[in-house]
Image: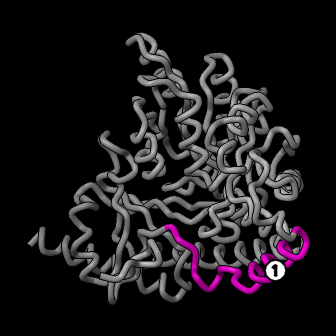
Amino acid sequence: MALSLMEFMERAGVTELAWGHPDPRFLPVRALRAAADRALRRYGPGALGYGRSAGPPPLIEMVRSRLAKVDARSPAADEVVITAGSSQGLDQIATLLMDPGDVALVEAPTYHLAIKLLRDHPVQLVPVPSDGRGLRVDAVAEAIRRVRADGGRPRILYTVPTFNNPTGLSLSGRRRRELVALAERESVLIVEDDAYRELSYDGPPPPSLWSMGRPGTVIRLGTFSKSIAPGLRVGYMTADAPTISRFADGGLLDSGGGISHFTGLVVAEYFRAGDYVRDVERLRAAYRKRRDRMLGALERHMPKGTRWTRPAGGYFIWVTLPPRFDTREEQPAAVRHGIGFAHGRTFFGDTPGGAQSLRLAFSRYPPATLEKAVRRLAASLQSRSTRRSG
């Protein structure tokens, strides 16, 4: 059997809204080819040798320059380390900063593969509920108290506070301040997954938790998977200088000569030429249209009593059906109607939640296809509901 080149698997006749992937037509093949050529011309063999453990300086300067424009503050050069994306950064945090038996507080719902990744380590996961304004800070405080009362050590809190995956929501400004203050008081490290910062559709994104916290309170995970291309496997962490040194001096980065040295230089050239800023603006405009079309389609077609989020950025809309539905049970019928989605339980791990909810991604398909997909989803739900009532 031939091996598949790509992770994405599209079933015949099915619009796959479960996948949070970019539209292949948006991937900048020509611009990156030119950037790779420029990197090789500029650096010669230096582009292909073992790199600096913290990452290539041109890329670190690019990260600093860009965050000065899209966040509340820019990191110093020694507050950045280059990663192979957010997942590799999170894995390194669990490897280097957590001990066996430590507790990771995880917002619920949250990015399901972060749950899977943390389960690869000998740590305990404790869910913390969120609501329509994001992670509940009072619930975080209660979870910390409960873990300590049971003799545990709450080491990190993993959260996606800006354009959350799966809900699309952003933590309110007040809660951001309260959460950072709580983490400082309780000495719990916030791990902020900031993957969608560049994909802001209704104005500037909110300030990162990292930009608000004292040194040592927050590690922010950034990535170019959403703003350029996921196949690059290039991202970054921002944290206080001693924490960055812990990662840069660790065995993984020291033995490999840094992460993604050549591709990091390619990204820096892509930015230097002005391609990054121009293409991000194009992505924002295109994804904004797709978000708006999907929101309109939900309004036009979904059953009475259905609710959904209205994200100001990111890839996803979180839909909650009336109580008579269970989205996991609805999946097979939806596929027969030509629509795939991610059911809500996926994003709660082993804890109860999400039975009536589902995640829809508007990133991969054009607006007209999204309209048809939502119409098919509504038809599938209506058909199942009619049969049950009959």
Image position, residue 11 (x, y; %):
33, 83
Seen at 35% across and 53% down, the residue is: 346
Seen at 48% across and 87% down, the residue is: 369
What range is drawn magenta here? 20-43
Q: Is 153 placed left or right of 82 in the picture?
A: left
Seen at 35% across and 74% down, the residue is: 340
Q: Is residue 94 above or below residue 58?
A: above
Q: Is residue 174 above or below residue 38?
A: above
Q: Is residue 213 magenta?
A: no
Q: In terms of depth relative to the viewer, which is nearer, 73 or 124?
A: 124
Q: Is residue 388 above or below residue 89?
A: below
Whether residue 120 is visible to the viewer of this picture, yes or no, is yes
Image position, residue 187 (x, y; %):
63, 19
Q: Quadrant of residue 248?
A: top right
Q: Which SS class for mark 1?
A: helix
Magenta span: chief secondary structure? helix
Residue type pointed to by label 1: Asp
Q: In terms of depth relative to the viewer, which is nearer, 348 or 6?
A: 6
Crowd class of label 1 (few under 14; some 14 to 19; many from 20; radius 10 Å)? some
Image position, residue 390 (x, y; %):
8, 73
Q: Which residue is mark 1?
A: 37
